[in-house]
Amino acid sequence: MSAERRGRRGGGAGVNTPPSSTATVPDAAAPVGMPAPPPTAMEIARLHAGELAEPHALLGAHPGVVDRLAGITIRAWHPDATRAECVLPNGSAVDMPMQARGLFGIFLPGETLPFRYRLRLHFHGGGTWEHDDPYRFLPTLGDVDVHLFNEGTHRRLWEKFGAHHREVDGVPGVAFAVWAPNARRVSVVGPFNNWDGRVYPMRRLGASGVWELFVPELGPGTLYKYELLTREGTPRLKTDPFAQMMEQAPATASIVVPEGRYTWGDDGWLKARAARDPVHEPMSIYEVHLGSWARVPEDGCRPLSYREIAPKLAEHVKKLGFTHVEFLPVGEHPFYGSWGYQVTGFFAPTSRYGTPDEFRYLVDTLHQAGIGVILDWVPAHFPKDDYALRRFDGTALYEHEDPRLGEHPDWGTLIFNYGRLEVRNYLLANALFWLDEFHIDGLRVDAVASMLYLDYSRSPGQWLRNRYGGRENLDAIDFLRAVNHAVRTEHPGCMTIAEESTAWPGVTKPVGEGGLGFTFKWNMGWMHDTLKYFSVDPVYRSYHQDQLTFAMMYEYSERFIMPLSHDEVVHLKGSLLQKMPGDPWQKFANLRLLLAYQFTRPGKKLLFMGTELAPGGEWNHDQSLDWHLLGDPMRQSFYRFMEALGALYRDNALFWRRDADWTGFKWIDVGDRQNSVVSYIRCDGPAHAVIVLNLTPVPRERYRIGVPGTHAYRLALSSDDARFGGSGYGQRDRLEVQAVPFHGHEHSVELTLPPLGALVLLPEDAPPAAPTTDDAEPALAVRTEGEAGQEAGGPAHG
C-alpha cells in the first residue's frame, strides 16, 4: 500500500499527513499533474452503488507520495460527468484522468494542504459546471457540539444541526448536519444535484451518529432533503428534522433560510418580561388558530398571512383587554385539519402563512402592542408520515421500537423515546428555539397526561411497566423537568403551561421540591364541571351547585389557568352559546354570567377566538370566524360586555395578583342552593371586590349579603346591564353599607339581583377601571383586503 493511500485513509480532507521519509521535493522539471493512485475496486463499487460511508477518505484533497514525489491527490466525483478539470489557484486548469465512471483523480507534486482549488466538470451535451469541491473542507461541526448532543445537554442545537448558510474559508455555502446513527450512508439531495443521492454523500463523524457536509455556493431558498441508506440497503428520502422552513403542503422539501436578518423592535418588552413573575401578573389569553381567524374572500378565502394578521390581531386583542395570545401549534404540519398538532417540522413555522421572519414580525407586532405570545407546543407525539421522523434512519430512532411504548392508540401517532439522550436533547432544544429565535413568552405543552402515564388510554396487556413496576413514564418525567428548568434558567419571565387532565401531584411545584416545574396548569376539571353546570336548566341548578363550586376545594393545589378552549367548541359539542339553556335572551345572559364567573374567580383566563362574537355554531377550521355576526345588535352588545369584562380584570390587581394565594379569595355564601346564588370576595390586601352570581332567571329583591367594607360600594360591572343586552333590572350604581351583621361580617348590603346576572362591587373609594366603549358599535381592526368601504364588523365570513 502506498504512503499516499495510508495518509488518505488515516484522515479526512485537509489533514496534512507528513510525507514518507523517502519522498523528494520535485525539481522544476516535474510535471504539473500526474495520474492519481487508483482507488480500490471496493471503493469504486460502493461509490457507484451509493453506499460509501466515508466519502472524505476517498474524495477531496489528501497528502501523499507518488514515485517518491511529495504532493497531494485530488479526486472528483459526479456519476454523470464525462470529464473533469482541476482549476488551480492561479486560474489554470489541469485535466483529471478518469479512474472509474464518474470518478477522476490527479496527483499534484510539490503542493501542500490547505490547497484552494475548484472543480470543472463536463457532461454529455457540452454542459460544464465549475464549483468549489465540498470534499476539501474540514468538518463544520465541532467535537464539543457533538459531545454535548450525544450526552443530551446541547441547549442551542438548532444553531449547529440542520442547514446553515455561512462562509467557510471565505467560500459561501450551506453547512448540513443530521443525526442518523444507524444509516449506512447519508447524502444531501436537492435540485442542485437532481435529487441524486450518489452525488453528495456526507461525512460520518466517528461513532456519534452525526453526518455533516459543507456544500459551497448553495444559499437561502435552496430546497433539500436527506437520502439515507438503511441497514437493509433501502434508500429513504427524509426532510431535515432541524429544518427551519419547509415547503407548503403537500410538498415536503426542507428550505435553507437566511441567517439572522430580522431586526427586532421589542427590546423594551423583553427587558420588562425578565423582571416580571407571570404568577403575579394579569393573564387573560386569547387562543388563536391562524388559519381561520380571518380570511380574504376576494382571494379564494385564503387565510391571512403572518404579516397581514399582525396589526389586525394586535389591535383586536388589545381592544378586548386580553394580555396574551396563544397560537395553536405553528410548527409545520402536513394535515391542516390537525390544527397543527401533528407536527413534522418542529423547528419550522408553517409556511402556509409566510416565512419565519414574517412570523417574527407577527410576534414583534404583538409585543410592541403590549401583548404576550404563548405557543402551543407538542412534544408528546409525532405523525407517521414516511418523509419525516418515523423510522428516520431505518430504525425506531426518535420513537420506541415496541408499539406498547412507541404508539399512541387514540391518535395513530408515535411517541418520542424520552430516554434516548439525543431525542431528549432534540426536544429540549426545540423548546428553547421558539423562545430564543421567535421571542415566544411561554409554551403550552400539549397532552402532558399522555406523556406521564405508560398506560394512558391503553387496556391491560397493551403497555409495559417501568423499572419499579409502576405506570409512570420516568423518562418523560425527567424530560419535562429538564425542559422547565431550562426555560427558567435561559429565559427568566417566560412560562410553561401544562395541559394535564389528571390529578398528577405537583405539576406546578418546583423541580427542586419534587414537582414537574410548570408555571401553570390548565384546570380541566373546572372547565368540565362548570360547562356541565351551565348546561343545566336553571330550574334544576339548585341540585348541582357543587359542580360550580367544587373546584375551589383544590384551587391552591396547583397554579391554574381556567380554559374555555377550542376543544370545547368542536366535534359536535356546539358553541358556548349553544351549550347555554333557555330562549335566545337567556342563552346570552347565561353566557355573560359564565364569563363573568370565569374572570372574577381565582386563576388565569383563556378563551378561544370567536367567543367575543357569540357564534351560534361550533368552530370550523376551514372558514373564517363569523365576523358578520357583529351586524346583529345583540352581538354588538355582547362584544361591549367582553370589552368591559376584559378591562375590569386587567385593570384591577385584586383579580389576579393573588391567584395562587388563598388570601386572595373568600366565600361570602356558597350554600344558598334554594335560590342558586353564590357570592364571594376577591382581594389584594385591603383592596377587595364583592361578586354575586344569580344563576336563575328569577330576580331576587332585597337580597342581603355580608361585606367586609364599612362604606358604600359602587357597581363596577353588571352582566345584566342594558348596554350588554341585559334587562338592567333594578340596577343601582351605588349601594349603601348597613351596620347589619350577616355572613360573618359586621356589615352588609341589600341588593336587587338581576336575572341570570353577575354583579361586581368595588368600594366606592376604589379607583375606577379604564373607560370602555359605551353604546358605539364595536370598531374592529380585522378588516381584510378589499373591505374598504364596508361597515365596521370584521372580515366577511370565509
Image (tube, helix red, strand yellow):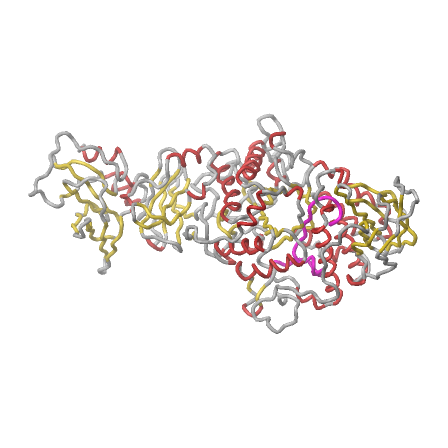
- Position of residue 524 measured from the top left corner of the image (x, y, whole percent): 70, 44
Q: Nearer the viewer, residue 546 or 463?
A: 546
Q: Residue at x 19, y 49 (%)?
A: 88
Instruction: Confirm whether the magenta stretch covers residue 148.
Output: no
Q: Quadrant for residue 569, please give it.
A: bottom right
Instruction: Confirm whether the magenta stretch covers residue 610.
Output: yes
- Position of residue 451 measured from the top left corner of the image (x, y, whole percent): 59, 38
216 displayed left or right of 539: left
Q: Is residue 567 visible?
A: no
- Position of residue 561 measured from the top left corner of the image (x, y, whole percent): 68, 44
Q: Is residue 630 visible?
A: yes
- Position of residue 28 measured from the top left corner of the image (x, y, whole percent): 7, 42
Which residues make up the magenta segment? 599-622
Q: Nearer the viewer, residue 50 or 168?
A: 168
306 displayed left or right of 54: right
Q: Quadrant of the N terminus?
A: top left
As drawn, the residue found furthest toward the top would be 468
Q: Residue at x 61, y 26 (%)?
A: 469
Q: Quadrant for residue 408, please give it.
A: top right
Q: Residue at x 66, y 53 (%)?
A: 322
As drawn, the residue found furthest toward the front would be 765
Q: Quadrant for residue 65, please give it.
A: top left
